Image (tube, helix red, strand yellow):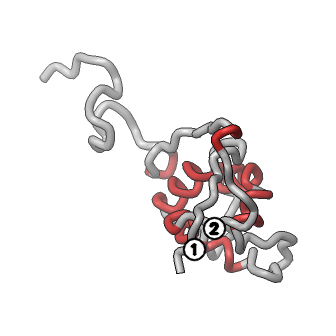
């Protein structure tokens, strides 16, 4: 092999072939932007099960009522939808969660994909996971 070819060419998820992982070794996460017209969610909807699992770590502080000096609750779909753009920003930047809490690469990718860059992708689920 002579290594010729386009950088990054190859099948998605093919390891480090053609490019380096994002900072910290985590997989690169695209920044989805969704059309708000596609969102028919209502405040009484639920978090999708995978998203609820991914954001579970947030509820160490953002419970109802909030603890440890935070001022917002992230328990319900309505709580998270109202703060989706801000949540996206602090997860993407690594500002949250505060130590000793952490998010795995899967948790971050799942949360960021669902939230969307401006919070526009945060669409509710009609049924609870429970």
Which mark is first along the chain, 2 or 1?
2
Where is residue 85 shown, x and y percent of the image? 74, 49
Q: Pointer 2: residues within 10 angstroms few (<14), some, or many (20+)?
A: many
Q: Residue 95, position in %: x, y?
A: 70, 58
Please report the residue visible at 78 percent of the width from the left and 81 percent of the height from the top: 64
The answer to whether the residue labelled 1 contacts the one labelled 2, judged by CB atoms less than 8 Å apart, is: yes
Left or right of 54 in this view: 69: right
Is 111 above or below relative to 11? below
Residue at x 53% of width, y 39% of height: 30
Residue 14: which quarter of the image? top left
Is residue 43 rendered to the left or right of residue 21? right
Please provide percent x and percent y for residue 41. 68, 55
Secondary element under disc 2, as helix, strand or loop, is loop
Residue 4 locus on image (x, y percent): 23, 17
> Which residue: 51% across, 46% down?
23
Q: Quadrant of the N terminus?
A: top left
In the displayed structure, does residue 91 sit left or right of residue 81? left
Q: Which residue is mark 2?
A: 46
Furthest residue in direction left, as rendered: 1
Report helix, strand or loop for mark 1.
loop
Which residue is the site of mark 1? 128
Quarter of the image where one finds residue 68: bottom right
- Give how far apart the Cα atoms at labels 1 and 2 are: 6 Å
Q: Foreground residue, 36 or 110?
A: 36
């Amino acid at each position: 092999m002579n290594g010729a070819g386009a950088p990054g060419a190859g099948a998605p998820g093919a390891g480090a072939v053609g490019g380096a992982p994002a900072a910290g070794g985590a997989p690169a996460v695209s920044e989805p932007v969704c059309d708000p017209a596609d969102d028919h969610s209502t405040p009484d909807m639920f978090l999708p099960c995978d998203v609820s699992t991914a954001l579970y770590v947030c509820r160490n502080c953002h419970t109802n009522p909030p603890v440890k000096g935070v001022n917002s609750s992230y328990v319900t779909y309505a709580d998270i939808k109202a703060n989706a753009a801000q949540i996206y920003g602090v997860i993407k930047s690594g500002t949250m969660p505060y130590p000793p809490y952490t998010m795995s690469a899967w948790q971050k990718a799942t949360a960021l994909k669902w939230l969307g860059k401006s919070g526009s992708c945060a669409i509710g689920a009609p049924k609870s996971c429970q």
